Image (cartoon, rainbow, N blue to C red):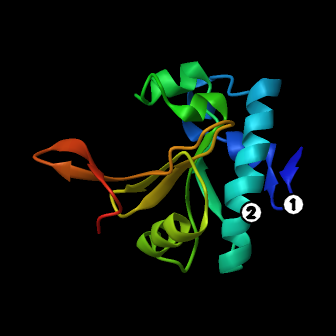
Amino acid sequence: MKLSPHFTLAEMTISQTAARRGIDNTPGDREIAALMTLCVEVLEPLRAHFDRPVIVSSGYRSPELNRAIGGSSTSQHCQGEAADFTVPGVSVLDLARWMHRNLQYDQLIYEFGRWVHVSYRAGALRNMELSAKRIAGRTRYLPGIQA
């Protein structure tokens, strides 16, 4: 099922953990609609600007999958509102900075300099930017996009 011109439901729901553990990671209609919105409003403009594929490492997560990977109980991945991704040939820092300047989103997280997490939801968008860093062995979320 195509969610937008360049994104499919399969790539937004694929999970090695779900496959390995036999977890059903099938979203419902509401989550599929949210994934479509995320693709159209955020991922498609990103792909168009950089003219490169967007590689999604984590999109929708069923509540069971989210628990299995130790995700936040309030994760927007479970509502189909978030994706973690990279773009081959583009630094993650450049992606985050471009998105900050050019797109609307709910939350943008520069994750350990290795991938970007972005969420988009219906209604008021927070346009919140954070950077995830390991400090003293723990993950800390700092304000803004920090290299």
The residue at the far left in this view is 136
Q: Residue at x 50, y 44 (%)?
A: 126
Q: Amino acid at mark 2?
A: Glu
Q: Identify the residue under disc 2.
A: 44
Residue 131 percent location from the top left of the image: 33, 55
Q: Identify the residue under disc 1.
A: 5
| Separation of residues labelled 2 and 1 (CA atoms) | 8 Å
Label 1: few (<14), some or many (≥20) within 10 Å?
few
Residue 35 percent location from the top left of the image: 73, 41
Q: Is residue 25 left or right of residue 75?
A: right
In the rendered image, the vertical position of residue 58 relative to residue 56, given as above or below: above
- Give yes or no for contact between labels 2 and 1 (Cβ–Cβ under 8 Å): yes
Q: Quadrant of the C terminus?
A: bottom left
- In this rendered view, identify the residue nearer to me: 125 or 131: 125
Q: Residue at x 41, y 71 (%)?
A: 93
* Secondary structure under the numbered disc 2 in the rendered image: helix
* Secondary structure under the numbered disc 1 in the rendered image: loop
* Residue 63 location, quadrant: top right
Q: Is residue 108 left or right of residue 52?
A: left
Q: Amino acid at mark 1?
A: Pro
